[in-house]
Amino acid sequence: MRGILTVFRKEFLENLRDRRTIFSALLFGPLFGPLFFVLMINIMQQQAETRDEQQVEVAVSGGAYAPNLLALFAERGITVKPVTLDEAGARRAIAAGDQRTVVVVPQEFPSRLAAGQPADISLYFDRSSEMGSSATNRVRDAVDDYGRHIAQSRLLLRGVDPTLLRPVVVKGIDVSTPKARAVLALGTLTFFVILAMLTGGLYLAIDSTAGERERGSLEALLTTPLPRSYLIYGKILATTAYMLLSLTVTLVALSIALQFTRLEDWGMSVDLSPRSVLAMVLLTAPLSLAGAGLMTIVASFTRSFREAQTYLSIVLMVPTLPLALVGLLDLKPTVAAMATPSLSQHFLMTRVLRGEWPQGWEILLSAGVSLALGLLLAWIAGRLYEREQILG
């Protein structure tokens, strides 16, 4: 054990002087990820506020046939732009981008309305336009309210209570907490955290295997009195340490960066207190050993630093791929999910963000499987370095 710790100390301290290792472990993932994440949230908030506050303009053809509708548009803050367009002209105006929304009131609208017959109003829009859809929704809501107001007025004139048409009233009651709503908005946070953690040990895993071979120092290193497996165990331990360092820095940076977001404006709150950060580090830490072992094994089969970098960039997708399937497949924290490394860490971190504490069996199963996988991969890496073929 002393030999493994000696190799660990040597690798850890030497890589503190390696710019690539420091950049990936302490700067790129841990700092760029949180900054990008917070920037993305702030942009989403600004876009939502812009859509709510923007002045909506609607082109109306035949507005003289529905003066009450125009008055309702004015009450809703919708600016009416009079135009003279038929169906083909409205389609061309939308397709060309001259108009976002066009309302066409046909000439027979007043007569049909007076006769108590259904009166059509055509609403032209482009669903593929994000800003256009926001404006269209406000115009559509106004037209729907206009129709409901006419229907209620007709019923009242006939002595019928309009509420009779609503025998069932649905009351929407949101039982979610601000923290739970924040987790929905921060759905990709766990992806950033795990990716940053794995990236933190990327260059050390490459340098201690393919890097040693490319420099020609691997053969001399394997002739030391220490068993070969001890050498690789020490290197894997150092890679794990850098991953844990990257994980800690990432979560601390996130806890600071999220203070510059206005989640409260959306009725959300996120708990990234020092206690929560510590809990997330401890719950995610077992995954680092599996990540270090996997990257060391893959890098052992490469012949150069560049080749290892290419392959390991692809390998990083293996632990993060399950996280991309969570929302797509609507996965739940079942026994199978908690026995899947990286996926189980996602669910554990999500519980902490929701202000909940994971159940004991979830923690034990997640940590147990991740550590067992990490030890198995480390053992395989040790056996690989017992072979003479490893010298190439």
Image: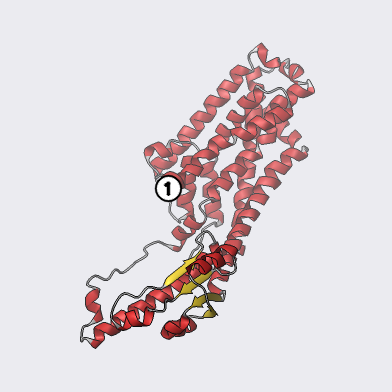
Q: Residues within 10 Å of mark 1 (few under 14, many from 20)?
A: some
Image vertical order of residue 114 relative to residue 351, above or below: below
- In depth, the one of 247 and 165 nearer the eye is 165
Residue 53: % across, % down? 55, 74
* Total numbered labels placed on residues in the image: 1
- In depth, the one of 176 and 167 nearer the eye is 167
Image vertical order of residue 292 relative to residue 327, above or below: above
Residue 35: % across, % down? 65, 55
Element at label 1: loop
Amino acid at dot 1: Pro
Q: Is residue 337 left or right of residue 242?
A: left
Q: Is residue 24 left or right of residue 127?
A: right
- In depth, the one of 349 and 115 nearer the eye is 115
- In depth, the one of 202 and 100 nearer the eye is 100
Q: Is residue 5 left or right of residue 19?
A: left
Q: Is residue 175 left or right of residue 42?
A: left
Q: Quadrant of residue 337?
A: top left
The residue positioned 22% from the left and 82% from the top of the image is: 161
Image vertical order of residue 141 relative to residue 293, above or below: below
Image vertical order of residue 218 relative to residue 267, above or below: above
Query: Which quadrant holds the N terminus?
Result: top right
Tell me the residue that label 1 is attached to.
358
The residue positioned 66% from the left and 28% from the top of the image is: 235
The residue positioned 47% from the left and 50% from the top of the image is: 350
Residue 195: % across, % down? 59, 42
- Res 20 visible: yes
Query: Which quadrant holds the C terminus?
Result: top right
- Res 263 visible: no
Residue 126: % across, % down? 51, 62
Q: Which colour assignment does the render follow? A: secondary structure
